[in-house]
Image (tube, grey):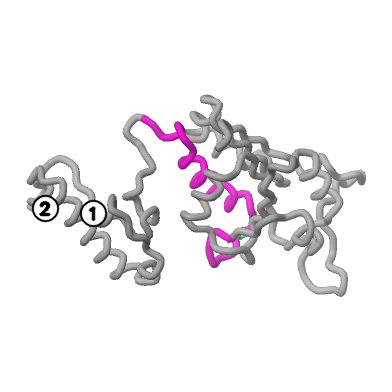
Amino acid sequence: MSEILKIDVVTIFPQMLNGFLQESMMKRAAAAGLVEFRAINLRDFTTDKHNTTDDRPFGGGPGMVMKPEPMFAAVESVKTPESRVILMTPQGKTFRQADARRFADECSHLIFICGHYEGVDERIRESLVDEEISIGDYVLTNGVLAATVVIDAVTRLRPGVLGGGEVATEDESFSSGLLEYPQYTRPPEFRGMPVPEILFSGDHGKIAEWRYGQSLKRTSERRADLLGGHRKNSENNP
Ligand code: ADE
């Protein structure tokens, strides 16, 4: 795994990224040199005086299509043999924790292509993009929002990014293939609602067993679709 993860985001709204990058985990990760973010303004790669990034579809029909020339130029300005080029689109494969883990573990350079309303010229898909990712079955006006979701989920899994009590654990939802078990903190009783007795027992084996049972119950009640893919390991499954 490389020391630093470089992330480039190609967009016509580079300033949309800034708010997100200048807060909390992202800001700390960048300041610590663990990740390096760059917003790449697609308009800087246009050659006409109107800085055109999209055009009408050949064959007619509604909407606009993002042009290939500025997109190829923008991506090629930062692409290396190590880069993974990801197109954010509702037509992509649905993003999951396993994808976040794969990007965090295997990639040293991610380039996100973000559309705005319209689709992209098919030649971008065919020969510029390695992977198409959707964050869910709904349509956003802007792929930047979707890219920030993926960037957040990936960055927090990079070594050293979470600290001071926050850790990406095997127990958190989706990492083990199950939803997380219920968590409690002080006080031991709140408004007549007590914390389950087992959690005060000091018996770590029994606590792990209880938590695993709760995770299974919660997953089967809320997300039975996850149960097939849930991986057994000794840490989670006593
Ligand atoms: N762009 C627009 N909608 C999107 C979605 N659901 N996922 C990824 N990118 C998108």
Magenta run includes residue 156: yes
Magenta stretch bounds: 134-163
Q: Quick check: 58 above or below 18?
A: below
Crowdedness of circle 1 by 10 Å Cα count: few (<14), some, many (20+)? Answer: few
The residue pinned by badge 1 equals 182
Q: Which residue is mark 2?
A: 196
Left-right relation of 224 to 114: left
Who's the residue at 65% across and 40% down the image? 109
Residue at disc 1, secondary structure: loop
The amino acid type of the residue labelled 2 equals: Pro
Q: Nearer the viewer, residue 87 or 203?
A: 203
Q: Quadrant of ligand 1?
A: bottom right
Q: Quadrant of the C terminus?
A: bottom left
* Residues under numbered marks 1 and 2 in contact, where contact means CB atoms less than 8 Å apart: yes
Q: Going by the image, does 131 lie left or right of 3?
A: right
x and y, in percent, of residue 148 in the image: 56, 46
**Residue projecting furthest to the top:** 32
Q: Which quadrant of the figure has residue 64? A: bottom right
Residue at 27%, 64% in the rendered image: 216
Question: 173 or 21, which lies in front?
Answer: 173
In the rendered image, residue 61, in percent from the top left (x then y), is placed at 80, 74
**Residue found at x 59% / y 49%:** 147
Estimate the x, y position of residue 179 in percent, counting from the top left.
33, 58
